Image (spheres, grey):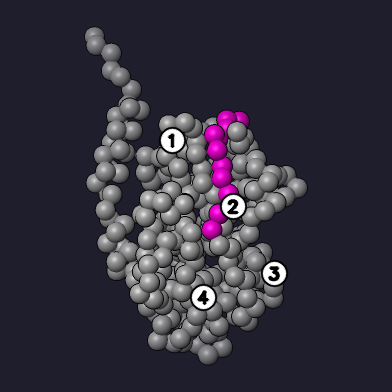
Amino acid sequence: MFPIISNNLIAPNLHRLVIRAPRIARACLPGQFVIVHADQQAERIPLTIADADIDQGTVTLYVQAVGYSTCRLVALPTGSSLRDLAGPLGHPTEITRWGRVACIGGGVGTAVLYPLAKALAEVGNQVISIIGGRSAELIILADELAQFSTEVLIATEDGSRGKQGFVTHVLQELITDPRSVPQAIYAVGPVPMMKAVSDLTRPHQIPTIVSLNPIMIDGTGMCGGCRVLVGGKLKFACVDGPEFDGHLVDFDLLADRLSTYRTAECQMLQQLAEKDRPTQRKA
């Protein structure tokens, strides 16, 4: 069993869970993930390790409650335990000293971006963090990123914080200014965002690394749900990644596959809502 040390709501539908898992905390590297198994009946959920504290023996996970299984997971209170926590899994990020690096996070992807950006800064890179969301309340970890970033640039779709627009608008400004052109880019977030970043950087031939953790399902490669074409070759995000060259990923095929289970997921959410609805007593 893996005790939940804390479970805090930090943004709408977004929870930060701190889990006691000493062995995983000692072994994990930036970019790796764990498989969470809340209880005997629960689904296996792959989640990127956002942070680890070796002294405390804990790992930090950010969970966005968007589906049936994640809603059940974030409902677990502090003091309860997870049945299983397997990891660390996946290939760690290849940390290179590029020079100037732009680290781009969209929504909850910022949580995945955090350990990558921190590791890149620690080897001497000048890190410019660009984070975005639909509104100010969905911007996370800005202060934490500021501790090792030369700049933290924020974009919100409604203009409630930072620049109004998308993270790609901010990135475009960096690329067009000779004084701020990054030598490499790391992007983590929704698939459409990572595609837009890759399309923007391709003509400039700026190396762009994307994390495909949002498409993983069981984390072992057995289900085939995270298969993706990279440079025309079949890869599995969970065992071959989760990070790939964004210029080689077939994002159109990937986006089409992600919609496969949308109807089934909506049905499960409806069942969860009905289960939680209070039963009305007859007069």
Q: Secondary structure at mark 4?
A: strand
The magenta region covers 79-90
Q: Nearer the viewer, mark 1 or mark 4?
A: 1
Residue 185 drawn at (x, y percent): 51, 75
Q: Amino acid at mark 1?
A: Ala
Which residue in the structure is indicated by mark 1?
A: 42
Mark 1–mark 3 distance (CA, rounded to whole Å): 38 Å
Determine the residue located farthest toward the right in the rendered image: 55
Q: Considering the whole magenta stretch, tell me its main secondary structure.
A: strand
Are circles 1 and 4 on residues that touch, CB within 8 Å?
no
Sequence order check, earlier mark of 1 and 3: 1
Q: Which mark is residue 244?
A: none
**Residue 85 seen from this side:** yes
Q: Amino acid at mark 3?
A: Glu
Q: Amino acid at mark 2?
A: Pro
**Along the line of sight, which residue is nearer the eye, 243 or 282?**
243
Q: Secondary structure at mark 3?
A: helix
Determine the residue located farthest toward the top in the rendered image: 283
Which residue in the structure is indicated by mark 3?
A: 122
Sequence order check, earlier mark of 3 and 4: 3
Are circles 3 and 2 on residues that touch, CB within 8 Å?
no
Are circles 2 and 1 on residues that touch, CB within 8 Å?
no
Residue 148 drawn at (x, y percent): 66, 67
Q: Amino acid at mark 4?
A: Ile
Mark 2–mark 1 distance (CA, rounded to whole Å): 20 Å
Query: Magenta stretch containing residue 83, yes or no?
Result: yes
Which residue in the structure is indicated by mark 4?
A: 185
- Which residue corresponds to the image point at 47% horizontal and 70% vertical from the top-left? 244
Q: Secondary structure at mark 2?
A: strand
Mark 3–mark 4 distance (CA, rounded to whole Å): 16 Å
Are circles 4 and 2 on residues that touch, CB within 8 Å?
no
Which residue in the structure is indicated by mark 2?
A: 88
